[in-house]
């Protein structure tokens, strides 16, 4: 990530640029000196880690320190504690890298088939039409032999994979119809809720990639809303890393998350700030 990209990313996130397009601006919540002191030395480590990253991207020390403090204060508001900049190594030498070949020639399709069926089963809880379809055509929701084998291999991989040694961030993007039950359920979420995503979840450490490719792909499908997931992966989390067009991550079947914050824009777009629950 270049100097301008990282600086703009931080500035936009903390609302320095105001509200334009789909950007979200939070009301200023003061973080007092007493609050900062209560979080030491974690606060100091977080400031230092972000400052080093900004200095490495070409910012001078004064600007790097200022942006780092703003970023960490924003994290304290959103996540309830200061977060360090801890990039997770995740290329082909990563021991957590998933060998999709072990799932068969069409592994990605099997994963999506399993996920779509899990979403359908979950949708039937709220949608009478889908519930009736489950009764009349149960085979549409049943996992095939090939899919069951893939799921078994995946579940074993999640059981064996080494947990993360550092805290990290993952991102996910989606575009949902505003009249869909999935969208309406997201709108009802509030701080402290536990949210479950049916099936397997694809995420990425590359925020621009997933937001640009998935969350912002609403133009041709009005009235869809842009959904942007910011997912905090605590130390000890288990995930499978996959390198396709971009670094991507697979989270386990029916993953659960704690809602730390939810932001809703006037046009219906949503930003969710979730913490992955390793249970």
Image (cartoon, rainbow, N blue to C red):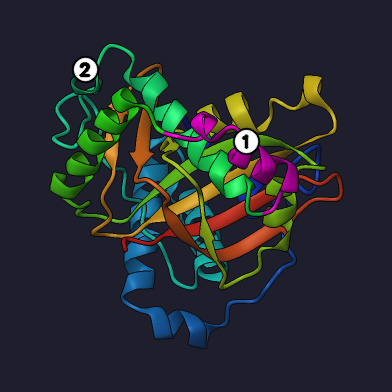
Side of 245 relative to 271 (left or right)? left
Q: Is residue 134 magenta?
A: yes
Give the magenta part as a residue range. Answer: 126-142
- Image location (x, y in percent) of residue 209: 52, 27
Task: Judge by depth and name the residue closer to the eye, 25 or 109.
Answer: 109
- Quarter of image, res 88: top left
Q: Is residue 261 magenta?
A: no
Quadrant (top left, top right, bottom left, bottom right) of the C terminus: bottom left
Q: Secondary structure at mark 1?
A: helix
Classify 255 as above or below 209.
Answer: below
Checking the image for residue 101, the label placed there is 2
- Image location (x, y in percent) of residue 277: 38, 62
Quadrant (top left, top right, bottom left, bottom right) of the N terminus: top left
Q: Is residue 99 visible?
A: yes
- The Cα–Cα distance between marks 1 and 2, rounded to whole angstroms, is 35 Å
Question: Is most of the magenta stretch helix, strand or loop?
Answer: helix
What residue is shown with label 1? 136
Side of 246 relative to 119 (left or right)? left
Most extreme residue toward the top is 105
């Amino acid at each position: 990530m270049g100097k301008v990209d990282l600086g703009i990313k931080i500035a936009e996130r903390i609302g320095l640029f105001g509200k334009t397009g789909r950007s979200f601006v939070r009301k200023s919540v003061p973080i007092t000196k007493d609050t900062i002191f209560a979080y030491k030395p974690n606060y100091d480590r977080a400031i230092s880690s972000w400052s080093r990253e900004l200095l490495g991207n070409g910012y001078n020390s004064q600007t790097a320190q200022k942006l780092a403090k703003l970023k960490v204060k924003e994290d304290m508001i959103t996540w309830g504690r200061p977060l360090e900049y801890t990039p997770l190594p995740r290329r082909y030498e990563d021991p957590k890298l998933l060998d999709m070949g072990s799932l068969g020639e069409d592994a990605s399709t099997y994963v999506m088939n399993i996920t779509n069926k899990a979403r359908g089963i979950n949708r039937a809880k709220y949608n009478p039409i889908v519930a009736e379809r489950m009764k009349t055509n149960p085979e549409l929701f049943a996992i095939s032999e090939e899919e069951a084998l893939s799921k078994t291999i995946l579940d074993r991989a999640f059981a064996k994979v080494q947990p993360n040694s550092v805290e990290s961030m993952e991102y996910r993007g989606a575009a949902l119809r505003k009249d869909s039950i999935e969208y309406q359920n997201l709108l009802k979420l509030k701080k402290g809720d536990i949210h479950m995503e049916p099936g397997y979840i694809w995420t990425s450490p590359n925020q621009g990639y997933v937001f640009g490719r998935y969350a912002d792909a609403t133009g041709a499908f009005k009235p869809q809303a842009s959904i942007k997931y910011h997912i905090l992966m605590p130390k000890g989390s288990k995930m499978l890393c996959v390198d396709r067009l971009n670094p991507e991550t697979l989270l386990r079947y029916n993953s659960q998350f704690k809602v730390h914050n939810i932001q809703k824009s006037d046009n219906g777009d949503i930003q969710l700030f979730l913490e992955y629950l390793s249970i």
